[in-house]
Amino acid sequence: MSTTTTINDNNIKLQLTRVFDAPRELVFKAWTDASQFQQWFGAAACDGGALQSVKVDARVGGKYRLQVRRADGEYFTTVGTYREVKPPERLVFTWAFEKDGSGDEFGEVESPEMLVTIEFRTRGNQTELTLTHEKFGSVESRDRHQDGWTRCLNELGKFVGK
């Protein structure tokens, strides 16, 4: 897996690239089907906690909500809106945290709202995935997300067959 981190014009950005031994349609669906997403994302994102719920409406203007309850009882709930959904090539969505993520429905969002772009490229029988996460509020936030996204991509690899 390759990783690039940059800071340009106050845009703190992280980019991860990984190749999976699976067709891109399968890898793309693992990101857009809520039941599949829950299977691999939960194992990586919870870090001792539990993925409480996953809501995915993968269409332009649709929203997602990922609710994680940590072992200490604190909630981390990520929400966003899909800006681009181009199967099986590209996903673009916002990424933000709810102020109080303990509810069952979408709540008030904290700043900053970040942006995630995922590109899926066919490489023979494999898929090259490039994840770009940008507009971080700090370098520390980027570094925490780098650790989290690395765990997520490792779990995704197990889920799709690599």
Image (cartoon, rainbow, N blue to C red):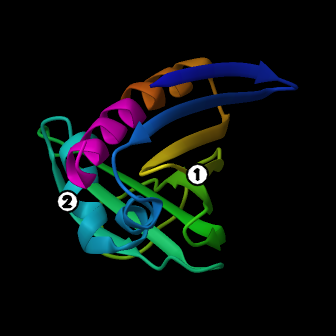
Q: In which quarter of the image is residue 150?
A: top left
Identity, as a three-letter code, of the amino acid under mark 1: Arg
Q: Where is residue 38 in the image (x, y as percent from the top left)?
A: 24, 62
Instruction: Tell me the tag on residue 39.
Output: 2
As displayed, is residue 91 above or below residue 41? below
Q: Helix or strand or loop: what does disc 1 sit on? A: strand
Residue beneath label 1, please? 121
Q: Helix or strand or loop: what does disc 2 sit on? A: helix
Q: Which residue lies furthest to the right in this view?
A: 9
* Main SS category, magenta section: helix
Q: Residues within 10 Å of mark 1 (few under 14, many from 20)?
A: some
Q: What range is drawn magenta here? A: 148-162
Q: Position of residue 1 (x, y in %)?
A: 44, 25
Q: Locate residue 142 relative to residue 47 in the image: left or right.
A: right
Q: In which quarter of the image is the C terminus?
A: top left
Identity, as a three-letter code, of the amino acid under mark 2: Gln
Q: Locate residue 154 relative to residue 49 in the image: left or right.
A: right
As displayed, is residue 77 above or below residue 162? below
Mark nearer the viewer, 2 or 1: 1
